[in-house]
Amino acid sequence: MGTPMDSARLPPWTPPDPTRRLGVLISGRGSNMQALLDAIAAGRLDATPAVVVSNRADAPGLAIARDAGVETLVVEHRGWKDRAAYDARLADVLEEHGVSLVCLAGFMRIVGPALLERFPQRVLNIHPSLLPAFPGLDAQQQAFDHGVRITGATVHVVDEGLDAGPIVAQAAVPVLDDDTANSLAARILVEEHRLYPVAVARVLDGGWRIEGRRFVVRRDVEAAPALR
Ligand code: GRF
């Protein structure tokens, strides 16, 4: 049971994001970025895609963003003094574009404090497993090899751990008897594309706070349909 002392120590509820400007970081295919752009275009996600940044010039997702009329930038991760210098450059670029929420979408770099401290609780990631199971690379293959019967997708607030921050939303995906790691990954991806826009809307709408490890939504905030 919580005591008045406990609630006195809790942070205030996060207000709605007044600008709702997304910065999306990618490294490759960009299908989750596309899901966000599609949701915005379809009016399911009230946000503005301010900029898409890739650490790789050959990321196929860059063309998808450009075709959708979104500004793109390449900020190569090589050639910086250290990771903090790279992260600070990313944060500069995002700030220059007025970004209020950073969405990692297949961004294959670990983001550290030099970026996170400038976007506190404002960096989200999508991961293709039910975290905390199977963090890191090839989560779908890890789940398949482990023999779990249910896996899925997770959207979480990014902290300094690997795939470790507070969980905003999850979707479960059963492992079928005739699955391969590839067929499983494909079904998880469908859920990722559904989940990410819903979770982004949840974060932008406010009425939540982080309590310890938990992303807690205020009781009177109506759940988005896909999160019910
Ligand atoms: C997705 O499976 C995502 O969960 C993971 O990396 C993959 C990126 O795919 N973080 P895409 O570039 O969004 O198509």
Image (tube, grey):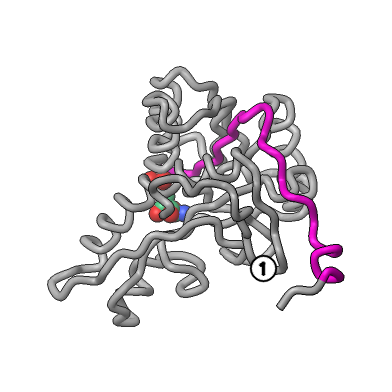
Relative vertical location of residue 166 with respect to residue 42 in this rendering, above or below: below
Relative vertical location of residue 109 with respect to residue 23 in this rendering, above or below: below
On the image, the x and y values in percent for residue 207 come to 65, 46
Question: Which of the two residues, 82 or 175, is positioned nearer the viewer here?
Answer: 175
On the image, the x and y values in percent for residue 128 come to 41, 60
Question: Which of the two residues, 66 or 190, is positioned nearer the viewer here?
Answer: 190
* Residue 120 in the figure: left or right of residue 21: right
Quadrant in the picture for residue 30: top left
Tell me the residue that label 1 is attached to. 213
Quarter of the image with the C terminus in it:
bottom left
Point 60% across, 39% down: residue? 204
Q: Is residue 7 magenta?
A: yes
On the image, the x and y values in percent for residue 59 come to 44, 38
Q: Is residue 129 magenta?
A: no
User: Which residue type carries mark 1?
Assistant: Arg
Point 59% across, 25% down: residue? 50
Quadrant in the picture for residue 214: bottom right
Identify the magenta region: 4-29
On the image, the x and y values in percent for residue 9 come to 85, 64
Relative vertical location of residue 130 with respect to residue 159 in this rendering, above or below: below
Point 39% across, 20% down: residue? 67
| Residue 213 seen in render | yes
Question: Which of the two residues, 83 or 227, is positioned nearer the viewer here?
Answer: 227
